[in-house]
C-alpha cells in the first residue's frame, strides 16, 4: 500500500467539482459561485465561463468544445467563446440534480445525477445514468443506482465506472459501440457510509480507478482486480475531497478538489472554502 499526502496548489474557491485535465490545464467548476475555471501549470487560475445555474461536471467533445452540466436547471451546456454557455440538451425530464460527466471519444456524454433533493431532506431515491449522444438524443441506463456520482471510462473505452455515493460502491457497465450500457455489476463494494461514501473518480492508464472519499479525506486507487493499492490524504485532515483528475506535465500529478465544509453547511449553498491540491503518483493519466 502506497500512502501519500497532497499539498495545496491554489485556494480561494468555495466548492469545487468536475476536475478534468485538458490541453495542459486543470479544469473545474466552482458550483455556488457559478464559475468554470482552468488552472495552468504555473498556478494561474482563469475564469473560462460564468453560468448562474450551479455548474458541475465537465467534459470535452472531440472538436475541443467544452461541455458543462448545470445542476440548477438539469441541463448539458456548451461553453461559448465569449465565456457564456448555450444549452445542448435539456435533462429535466430524466434528472434531479444532474452532476458529474465523462465525454467519450465520439462525443457522447455520460452524466450522473443525485436523483433526489438531497439538501432539502428528501428520502433517497435510485436514479439512472443519462447518456447524451452527439446528435442531442437523450437516453437513460442502469437501475438501482444510489446517487450515481463520479464517472469515467476504462482505457479501451469498453467499461464505464460509476461511483454511488450513498451505496459506497463503484458499479461498472459494458459500453457497446453505439454507446449503450449493459451488464451492470458491482466493481468494488466498501463497508460503511461514515468512512466509505464516494464522490468523484478518474481512471488511469493501467485501468485502475482513483475515487474520492469525502468523509475519509482521502483518494483511493483501486486496481482492476479490486485491490486498493494507494491512498492519498488531503493536505488538511478532515477536509472533504470531492473530485480528482490525473494530469500535469507527465500525466502523473493527481489533482484533488477539496473543501472545508460539512453536509449541513453544504445545504446552505455550499458554505465553506475550497482549494486545489496535488500529489505525484506512479500511475499516469489516460492519453
Image: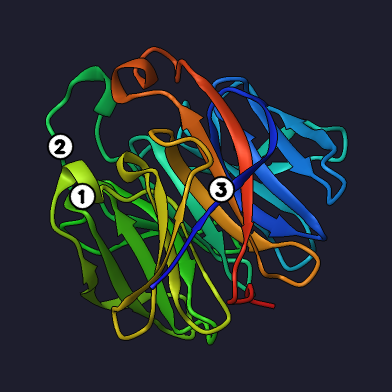
Q: Is 250 placed left or right of 170 in the picture?
A: right
Q: Cβ–Cβ below 8 Å for labels 3 and 2?
A: no
Q: Is residue 152 above or below residue 243?
A: below
What residue is pinned by disc 3?
256
Q: Is residue 139 above or below residue 38?
A: below
Question: SS at mark 2?
Answer: loop
Residue 74 horizontal side relative to residue 45, left or right: left
Q: Quadrant of the C terminus?
A: bottom right
Distance in Å between CA atoms under marks 1 and 3: 23 Å
Q: Residue at x 53, y 28 (%)?
A: 15
| Identity of the residue drawn at 49% across and 31% down | 259
Residue 200 % position (x, y): 44, 52
Q: Earlier in the sequence, mark 3 or mark 2?
A: 2
Q: Mark 3 Cα within 10 Å, few/some/many (few <14, many 20+)?
A: many
Q: CA distance from mark 1 to mark 2?
A: 8 Å
Q: Marks 3 and 1: in contact by CB < 8 Å?
A: no
Residue receiving disc 1: 146
Residue ID at (87%, 33%): 82
Amino acid at each position: 500500500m502506497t500512502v501519500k499526502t497532497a499539498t495545496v496548489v491554489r485556494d480561494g474557491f468555495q466548492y469545487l467539482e468536475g476536475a478534468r485535465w485538458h490541453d495542459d490545464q486543470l479544469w473545474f467548476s466552482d458550483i455556488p459561485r457559478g464559475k468554470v475555471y482552468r488552472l495552468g501549470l504555473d498556478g494561474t487560475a482563469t475564469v473560462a465561463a460564468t453560468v448562474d445555474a450551479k455548474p458541475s461536471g465537465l467534459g470535452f467533445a472531440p472538436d475541443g468544445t467544452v461541455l458543462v452540466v448545470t445542476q440548477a436547471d438539469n441541463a448539458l451546456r456548451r461553453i461559448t467563446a465569449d465565456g457564456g454557455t448555450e444549452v445542448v440538451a435539456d435533462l429535466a425530464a430524466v434528472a434531479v440534480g444532474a452532476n458529474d460527466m465523462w465525454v467519450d471519444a465520439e462525443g457522447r456524454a455520460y452524466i450522473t445525477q443525485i436523483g433526489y433533493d438531497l439538501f432539502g431532506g428528501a428520502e433517497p431515491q435510485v436514479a439512472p445514468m443519462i447518456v447524451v449522444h452527439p446528435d442531442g438524443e437523450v437516453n437513460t441506463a442502469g437501475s438501482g443506482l444510489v446517487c450515481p456520482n463520479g464517472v469515467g471510462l476504462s482505457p479501451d473505452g469498453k467499461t464505464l465506472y460509476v461511483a454511488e455515493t450513498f451505496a459506497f460502491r463503484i458499479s461498472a457497465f459494458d459500453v457497446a459501440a453505439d454507446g449503450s450500457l449493459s451488464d451492470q455489476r458491482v466493481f468494488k463494494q466498501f463497508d460503511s457510509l461514515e468512512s466509505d461514501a464516494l464522490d468523484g473518480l478518474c481512471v488511469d492508464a493501467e485501468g485502475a480507478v482513483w475515487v474520492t472519499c469525502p468523509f475519509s479525506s482521502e483518494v483511493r486507487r483501486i486496481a482492476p482486480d479490486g485491490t486498493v493499492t494507494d491512498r492519498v490524504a488531503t493536505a488538511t485532515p478532515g477536509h472533504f475531497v470531492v473530485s480528482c483528475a490525473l494530469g500535469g506535465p507527465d500525466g502523473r500529478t493527481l489533482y484533488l478538489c477539496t473543501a472545508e465544509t460539512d453536509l449541513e453547511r453544504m445545504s446552505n449553498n455550499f458554505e465553506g472554502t475550497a482549494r486545489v491540491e496535488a500529489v505525484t503518483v506512479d500511475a499516469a493519466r489516460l492519453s
